[in-house]
Amino acid sequence: MPQNYTPEFKKKIVRLHEEEGRTYKSITAEYGVSKASISKWCRELCEECQTSPKDKEEYGSMKENLRLKRENDELKKEIAFLKKRRHSLQRKSIRGLSIHRPIS
């Protein structure tokens, strides 16, 4: 039996997929919406963007936010790796040094 969803709900679902990068599977599990519906709503929004400048700007903004979030995640991973690497190198240099000075 088909359900009627509000336009706001549909936009929210599309935003989760497009802006936050959520998968159809995770959205389906959380909201109980079929993958086919999500795909259809994304396609419809894309088509609306071709005719409405306001929607086109909103869709572009969602895409840009997703790109920036992904880039931010990659940079966080790189920073964490570099911190671990720096710490590892510092520990190696400390191991080679003697803590006690010989008494002369």
Image (cartoon, helix red, strand yellow):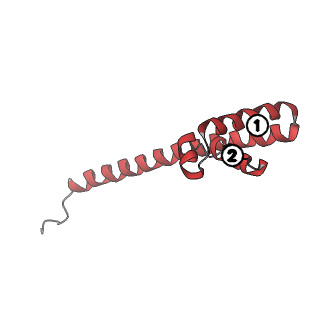
Q: Residues within 10 Å of mark 1 (few under 14, many from 20)?
A: some
Q: Which residue is mark 2?
A: 15
Going from the N terminus, do you reach mark 1 or mark 2 first? 2
* Residue 91 in which image quadrant: bottom left
Q: Marks 2 and 1: in contact by CB < 8 Å? A: no
Q: Nearer the viewer, residue 20 or 41?
A: 41
Q: Identify the residue at horizontal 76%, vertical 37% (top origin).
A: 45
* Residue 49 in which image quadrant: top right
Label 2, secondary structure: give it.
helix
Q: Nearer the viewer, residue 82 or 68?
A: 68
Q: Residues within 10 Å of mark 2 (few under 14, many from 20)?
A: some
In the picture, measured across the screen, residue 22 lies left or right of residue 85, that is: right
Q: Nearer the viewer, residue 46 or 61?
A: 46
Q: Quadrant of the N terminus?
A: top right
In the picture, measured across the screen, residue 88 lies left or right of residue 33, that is: left
Which amino acid does the dot numbered 1 rest on?
Leu
| Residue 14 locus on image (x, y percent) | 69, 43
Q: Identify the residue at horizontal 65%, vertical 39% (top origin).
A: 38
Label 1, secondary structure: give it.
helix
Q: Which residue is mark 1?
A: 45
Q: Identify the residue at horizontal 70%, vertical 46% (top origin).
A: 3
Residue at far front of view: 1
Q: Identify the residue at horizontal 34%, vertical 53% (top origin).
A: 87
| Residue 64 locus on image (x, y percent) | 69, 40
Which amino acid does the dot numbered 2 rest on?
Arg
Residue 33 is labelled as none
Q: Quadrant of the C terminus?
A: bottom left
Compared to 25, does 83 lie above or below? below
Residue at far bottom of view: 103
| Residue 47 locus on image (x, y percent) | 79, 31
